[in-house]
Each structure stands twice: as C-alpha cells, then as structure tokens.
Image (cartoon, rainbow, N blue to C red):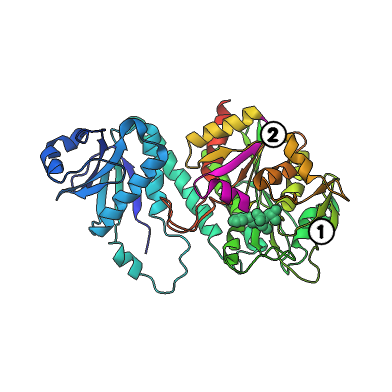
Amino acid sequence: MEDATVEITTRHNPRYVAVQFCYSEKGKKPVLEGGLKDLKERLEEQSFSGKLSETTFLGDRVVVGLGEKEKLLGRNMRTAAVSAVGLVQALKIKEIEIDATSLGQIHIKNLVYALKVKLHKSGDFKSKKGDDEKEKGGLKHVSVLVNEKDVNIANDALMIAESVNYARDIANNPANIATPKFMADKARELAKKHKLGFRLLAKEDMRKMGMNALLAVSSGSAQEPMLPIIEYKAKGAKKTIAVIGKGLTFDSGGISLKPSKGMEEMKFDKSGACAVLGVMKAVAELRPKVNVIGLLPSTENMPGGRAAKPGDIVKAYNGKTIEIDNTDAEGRLVLADVLAYADDKYKPDYIIDMATLTGACVVALGNICSGLLGNDDAFNKLVKNASLDSFDEVWELPLWPEYGELMKGKYADLRNISGTGEAGTITGAMFLSNFVAKAKWVHLDIAGTAYRPRPIPPIEFGASGAGVSICIETIKLLEKD
Ligand code: BES
Ligand code: ZN
Ligand code: ZN
C-alpha cells in the first residue's frame, strides 16, 4: 500500500472533507475562525472546548483543538495534526482538506511535516500487507490549504519530511540487512543520484591513516568497517560544515557485552549516520551556498577473538592515546578518529556530529529532546536557534573543562569511560572534544530521540530521523550568517 499523498494547495476543493482548527480560551467558549464560525452552536452542543488534540466530527467536517493560541508550540501542532489524522482514519474518510490559512508559518511547517511523516509507512517487514490499512481506514489524500505567501515554506517542510522519512527507512533496517557495506552502498547511491562527490575509505585506508580507535571497535566483527564520505561543494561558498553521524550498525557492547534485554534496539545505533544521509539528500535538493561534507563511519561492535579488550591502548588519528576501559563506550572511539580526520582534512568552519552516544542522555532528557553540547557558545546558540525552526527539540548541557578531568587516562592520554558513572553525557562529549582542534563544533546526543520505544507524534514506532531537520535549518542559518 502506497503512502497517502500530501499536497500543498492554495485552491479550496469542496470535494474533500474539511479539517479545521479551533483554539481554546481560558474560562471561555472556543475561539472559532473562518469557516468554523457558522458551526458555533453545533460545537457548543458537543461541549467542545478546543483544547489541544481534542477532535470532533460535525457531519461534514473534522474539527481539531489547538489549545490556547498564545501557547501553541511547533510540537503541539505536530500532536494536533496526528490527532486529526487519527479521527479521519477512524471515520474511514479517504480524502481531506486541512485549512491552514489562519496558521502562522512555523505551525504550517510543523503541520505539513507531521502529516508527511505520520503517513509514511516505515520499518514494516510483515509479510501480510493490508490488515493495517483496513484498520486505518485507507486515507488516500491530504490537501493542505495555505495562502499564496506560505506555499514555499509548506513545500520546504514537505521536502524536509521526505528526507526524514528517507533516513528512517534506512535506520529501520535490522543489522543483518544494514551492514557497514549497506551503509556505504546507500551513501554511494545517494551521491550518484544527486551528482554529489563520493569517497569511500576502507579498512586499509583507515589503517594507513592511523584510525586505530575506529579499527579497534570493528576488530571483533566479521564485517569490514566503512567510512563513506559525501561531498557537496557550492560555487562561491564561504563556509564549510562537516556533518558526522555515528554508524554502529549493531552495538552488542563488544567484550563489555550488553545485557540481552533490549539489545535488539542496538540496531538503531546507526541512526546518526542515517541522519547524515537524510541531511545530504536535503542539501542536494536545496543547493545552499555552503559546502557540506557528510561522513558516516559504519561498523559493528562485536565480541570475538580479535575484539578489543578492556585495558587495550590505541593511538587515534590525531596521535592521542586512549585506554579502552569499556568496549561498550565505542561510539566515542569511532567519532574520535572521524572528528579528527574531518577537522584535519576538510578544515571545516563548523562540525556537527550526531550520535546515539549515551544511555545517560536517555536518563537525563528522555525521548523528547536531544542533548546539545559544543565548544563555541555562538555556534551552540546558532544551532539552538535552528532547532526552533526545526522538528528537533534540543537541550544544552555544559561542556566545562572541569568534567574533562574524569576522562584523563591512567596509562594513556585519555580513557574512554569516566569510571564514576556521573554526568555520562557530558563526559562522553568531553572525550570527543579532544579530537576537534580547529572547528566550531556541536555534538548532538540522540540516544533518546533516534527511535521511539513508544509513540511520540508523528512517529508511532522505530526510527525517528532525529537530527535531520536541525542540521538542515543550521545550514540555512549559516548560509544567511
Ligand atoms: N549505543 C550506546 C548508547 C545508547 C544507549 C544508545 C541506549 C541508545 C539507547 C553506547 O554505545 C553505549 O553503550 N554507551 C554506554 C557508555 C558507558 C559504557 C560509558 C552507556 O551509555 O551505557
Ligand atoms: Zn556501546
Ligand atoms: Zn553505541
């Protein structure tokens, strides 16, 4: 079954069932706008208050509450959009038109994005298709009615949603399908399709260049590690950003083996790399006046006779020595080499890395927002501003030198775990900071946001594409800066 189509239009089509929004006002009747005004009495009869996500059907149209107008956030709009789709599917309506003509641009963006992501089927490997569709009523088409001035922004949101869906589709593959080679093939295919530059560093290249931390992580696996690199170069660009994603196609923990409960989720440990693919797809379509280099180091972390052992000491690309005290803290080892390599080889002004790096981030922030840490206050701020325009929520944690003390090694320059168990997300980022010499750098810990253990609108389960949209908005801001 195909995804329902989502179309942006400025022309009302009376054939479709109308979906309209309604605000609530504290202690008052709901605030009706436009075409809803004539329904005042019918809404009152139903004691419809207009609170967020409240829905009702009035015979010829669906009404969705948005809560108080001044309090409406982008993410609330996503929730409301998903509730609207829920009622439409329950009613088995096939075609709808959502009236977005009275919404501000940020809400139009979130609405369109939520619809496109919600209506995209991803991560379904069931052999029997169809039952699910019947259950969901077979919604086929969604028209979003906007004013002429908002057409571009709505189409832009549609394009970003497609990039997010693309990243989700890749990330939802299990580790027996999505191997490091699979990731390299996906990167090559994307580069070819959009005429972007492509390079692939294989094991031998890594060895020659001294990427020994990455190689240590991959050493227990039967799969060879891959470092695909996609290069977008713009004429007249004054800035370069490198976007790096952790691509652990499976993280068993290695010799520091993870408990079996929940280990299957570690197929999502490649989500950062998948997000990079999503970013590069959007970049290829947007063609910004900024150079963008996407790097997606891909490997498995497995136990085995050749696997790295706790206590092993390796020398990373930048010459720093690392004591591997826990083989499950592998993401930072992979990123150590690739951050240092990207910084040295491409001399980017900016680097963003996205990584499902620490369970501690899930403890601190849950599944709602990603952790943000960086080495430059102005760039941190820029990325946080980009977040406000994106579909990714972030929260900053402090990257203060004091935390770095915990990562100093006993036998080597650094150790890959702090040993105290405190401030795990910060110490992880502190470790990474040792491998960025020049660039302004932001690290996004997406451990809690990259996949959904339970539904968070607009994603029901599986990979979320976290990180894609914040990177795209960051690149757009850098272009203007
Ligand atoms: N991939 C995990 C982090 C993770 C945990 C992602 C839960 C998504 C959900 C990472 O490689 C890891 O194992 N980190 C360790 C670090 C520790 C040993 C310092 C962790 O968080 O326990
Ligand atoms: Zn791990
Ligand atoms: Zn991991």
State which quadrant residue 146 falls in. Answer: top left
User: Residue 80: horizontal and vertical position, in percent?
Assistant: 33, 45
Which residue is farthest right?
411
Q: Nearer the viewer, residue 163 or 393?
A: 393
In screen coordinates, is 386 left or right of 213?
A: left
Is there CB contact under 8 Å for labels 2 and 1?
Answer: no
Q: Who comes first in sequence, dot 2 or dot 1?
A: 1
Q: Nearer the viewer, residue 380 or 5?
A: 380
Vertical side of 404 occupied by 326: above or below = below
Stretch of the chain drawn in magenta: 359-376
In screen coordinates, is 282 left or right of 81?
A: right
> Residue 365: in sight, yes or no?
yes
Q: Which mark is residue 375?
A: 2
**Amino acid at circle 1:** Glu
At mark 2, the secondary structure is: loop
Residues packed near mark 2 inside 10 Å, few (<14), some (14 to 19) or many (20 plus): some
Q: Which residue is mark 1?
A: 204
Q: How many marks?
A: 2
